Image: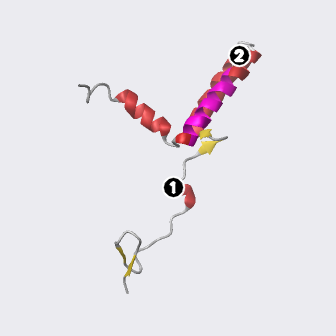
Amino acid sequence: MIAPNTYGAQHIEGFEAPMHRALAEPILLGGAPRAIAIVNGTLAAAIGLGLQQWIAGLLLWAFGHTLAMFAAKRDPDFAPVLARHLRQKGHLAC
């Protein structure tokens, strides 16, 4: 028997598979995208430990992580979108 779903499409028995939540959710580290959090922490550690500028390193980390958290809360895929935006120069410019 074919059962309709909420969008009007039909489900065929035997052709459905459950999808794990981890495949659909973004990978966040402390609320920020994982790659951005790692780069931000590495840069802050290099400034704080390497240059011995502890306050500057902590401020950079706190500001960068907070900014990344707010951006990820608004759109979890903001990093790939920003990279794509910067890569496509003026293709649609008037």
Q: Position of residue 26 (x, y in %)?
A: 54, 48
Q: Is 46 or 60 nearer to us in this picture?
A: 60
Q: Is 69 or 87 nearer to us in this picture?
A: 69
To which quarter of the image does residue 57 belong? top right
Q: Earlier in the sequence, mark 1 or mark 2?
A: 1
* Label 2 Cα neighbours within 10 Å, binned few <14 / some 14-19 / many ≥20: some
Residue 54, label in figure: none
Q: Main secondary structure of the magenta part?
A: helix
Q: Which residues are magenta?
A: 60-73
Residue 63 belongs to magenta span: yes
Tell me: residue 93, above or below residue 78: above
Instruction: List the residue tagged with mark 1.
Output: 24
* Label 1 Cα neighbours within 10 Å, binned few <14 / some 14-19 / many ≥20: few
Instruction: List the residue tagged with mark 2.
Output: 56
Q: Position of residue 29 (x, y in %)?
A: 64, 41
Residue in the image at 43% along x and 73% along y: 16
Q: Position of residue 27 (x, y in %)?
A: 57, 46
Question: Quarter holding the N terminus?
Answer: bottom left
Residue 37 belongs to magenta span: no
In the displayed orientation, state which residue is furthest to the left.
94
Residue in the image at 40% along x and 81% along y: 13
Asked if residue 32 lies left or right of residue 54, the reply is left
Residue in the image at 36% along x and 83% along y: 2
